[in-house]
Image (cartoon, rainbow, N blue to C red):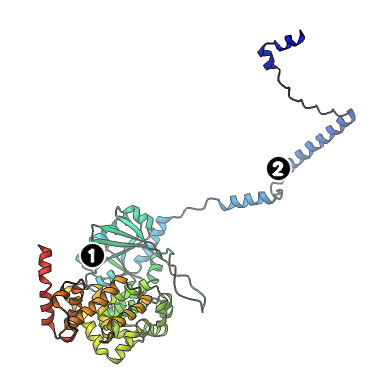
């Protein structure tokens, strides 16, 4: 009877029967004597805190010594305190006044100035920056010749320049530059003023591997290679800014380094190639101290990156004055470091190299532009190839030059095929089927090399015309 009653209890009552939580036992109250002791201790603590607060008000300088963690937090707060804002506009104005003190009266024809460079300078100046046309274009303008390209230097950082122009792109690893394009074929290079490389102790390596320090216009002019390249030009006011006496050296027709020549060459040995090119192109003399530095540190040229050396060599061959540049390099003993094979050949038979380089220079001047890189390379290589095993000789030479200059592989292959094809075109050369040779891909390169050789020797011009006649039908079919 009892079990049935228990089991028949309603479900709601069964759900209410849950296990109860255990209650914490109350702490035992202290005895009356203990209560009085606790009260006394609490009163003492309150009195001690009140006394400390009153002492802190009376002596604010006396602060408790912070613990380790609190000390680190305090240090972080101190390092993140707001600094004084940099007055960029004031700095630009100060640099502008400094440049006004270095103005040189010089008349430059406005027709020679690039409109694209003028637009960039005007836009950057409107945005609160200081900008000039700089470098070789100012040198050419001062000499009354039209520059091939224009460069701009400014206080604006690369990101600021890129945001200022729609078609602008940041390039460069060693130093960030901005290429601003106008149409498909026109481009202006914009750089930020840079400071000089920090000085190193005597005996240390002076070769510059990083050059990413921004600076003032004066510092930028003084860190450049030669005085004739350290000029600034403001196309808006029509004035030249000369911090390095470049105008005087232009009038004296001298290539002189900015600063000690020994240090400048050790910082960047590629400046040797640039000095040879400028002296030959402008018809200037190289300063005696710079010549001495070239003789002393010429071997350092191989420490530079191969792509830079290859590009500077091509610039010399494209200049239209390569014969003078090679002759000067041989005289200073520099050619034996960068092109020992050519130096040895010029010592034994200089006439052959001189004739080919002079023919190349005449071709550049005649066409108004440099020919294909294949012809530039052939003018230097041809005197080094004999009639016996020419393919092996060219292959071996190109392997050595590739370690030195990183000559493009396709260009090396074209040079080998072109020289062998040109040898087959002369009457005393190896016999070939003319029609079969004319159908080969190397035919065009072989004709251009043969044309260079006949210009150098002064004979065989009719032979070149006959071979070109075999090229005409194919050209007409392509035009049709």
- Residue 165, placed above or below residue 424: above
Is 475 or 185 nearer to us in this picture? 475
Q: Residue furthest bottom?
A: 348
Is any atom of residue 281 visible in this view? no
The residue that appears at 28% across and 69% down in the rendered structure is: 138
The residue wearing badge 1 is: 113
Residue 132: numbered disc? none
The residue that appears at 32% across and 71% down in the rendered structure is: 409
- The quadrant of the rendering that contains the N terminus is top right
Quarter of the view holding residue 378: bottom left
Residue 97 lies, in percent from the top left, at 37, 63
Contact (CB < 8 A) between labels 1 and 2?
Answer: no
Quarter of the view holding residue 50: top right
Residue 154 lies, in percent from the top left, at 35, 61
Is 477 or 73 nearer to us in this picture? 477
C-alpha distance separating marks 1 and 2: 74 Å
Is 46 or 310 nearer to us in this picture? 310
Residue 41 lies, in percent from the top left, at 83, 36
- The quadrant of the rendering that contains the C terminus is bottom left
Is any atom of residue 222 visible in this view? yes
The residue wearing badge 2 is: 57
Residue 111 lies, in percent from the top left, at 19, 65
């Amino acid at each position: 009877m009892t079990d049935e009653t228990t089991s028949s209890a309603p479900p709601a009552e069964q759900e209410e029967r849950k296990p109860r939580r255990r209650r914490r036992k109350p702490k035992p109250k202290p005895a009356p004597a203990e209560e009085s002791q606790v009260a006394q201790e609490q009163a003492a603590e309150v009195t001690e805190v009140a006394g400390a607060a009153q002492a802190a008000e009376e002596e604010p300088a006396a602060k408790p010594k912070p613990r380790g963690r609190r000390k680190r937090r305090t240090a972080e707060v101190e390092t993140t305190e707001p600094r004084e804002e940099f007055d960029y506009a004031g700095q630009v104005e100060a640099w502008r006044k400094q440049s006004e003190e270095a103005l040189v009266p010089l008349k430059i024809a406005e027709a020679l100035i690039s409109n694209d460079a003028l637009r960039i300078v005007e836009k950057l100046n409107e945005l609160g920056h200081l900008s000039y046309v700089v470098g070789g274009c100012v040198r050419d303008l001062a000499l009354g010749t039209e520059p091939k390209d224009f460069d701009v230097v400014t206080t604006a950082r690369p990101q600021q320049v890129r945001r200022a122009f729609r078609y602008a792109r940041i390039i460069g690893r060693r130093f960030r530059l901005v290429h601003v394009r106008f149409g498909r074929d026109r481009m202006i290079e914009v750089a930020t003023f840079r400071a000089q490389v920090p000085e190193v102790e005597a005996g240390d390596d002076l070769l510059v591997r990083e050059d990413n320090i921004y600076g003032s216009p004066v510092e930028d002019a003084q860190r450049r290679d030669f005085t004739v390249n350290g000029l600034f030009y403001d196309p808006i006011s029509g004035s030249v800014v000369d911090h390095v006496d470049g105008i005087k050296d232009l009038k004296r027709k001298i290539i002189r380094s900015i600063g000690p020549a020994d240090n400048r060459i050790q910082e960047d040995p590629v400046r040797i190639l640039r000095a040879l090119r400028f002296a030959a192109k402008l018809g200037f003399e190289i300063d005696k101290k710079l010549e001495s530095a070239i003789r002393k540190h010429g071997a350092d040229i191989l420490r530079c990156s191969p792509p830079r050396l290859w590009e500077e060599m091509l610039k010399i061959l494209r200049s239209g004055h390569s014969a003078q540049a090679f002759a000067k390099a041989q005289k200073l003993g520099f050619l034996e470091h960068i092109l020992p094979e050519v130096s040895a050949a010029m010592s034994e038979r200089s006439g052959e190299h001189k004739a080919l380089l002079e023919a190349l220079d005449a071709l550049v001047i005649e066409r108004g532009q440099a020919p294909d890189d294949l012809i530039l390379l052939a003018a230097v290589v041809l005197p080094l190839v004999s009639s016996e095993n020419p393919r092996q000789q060219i292959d071996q030479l190109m392997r050595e030059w590739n370690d030195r200059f990183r000559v493009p592989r396709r260009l090396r292959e074209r040079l080998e095929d072109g020289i062998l094809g040109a040898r087959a075109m002369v009457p005393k050369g190896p016999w070939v089927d003319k029609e079969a040779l004319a159908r080969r891909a190397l035919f065009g390169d072989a004709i251009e090399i043969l044309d260079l050789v006949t210009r150098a020797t002064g004979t065989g011009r009719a032979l070149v015309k006959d071979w070109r006649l075999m090229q005409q039908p194919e050209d007409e079919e392509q035009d049709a």
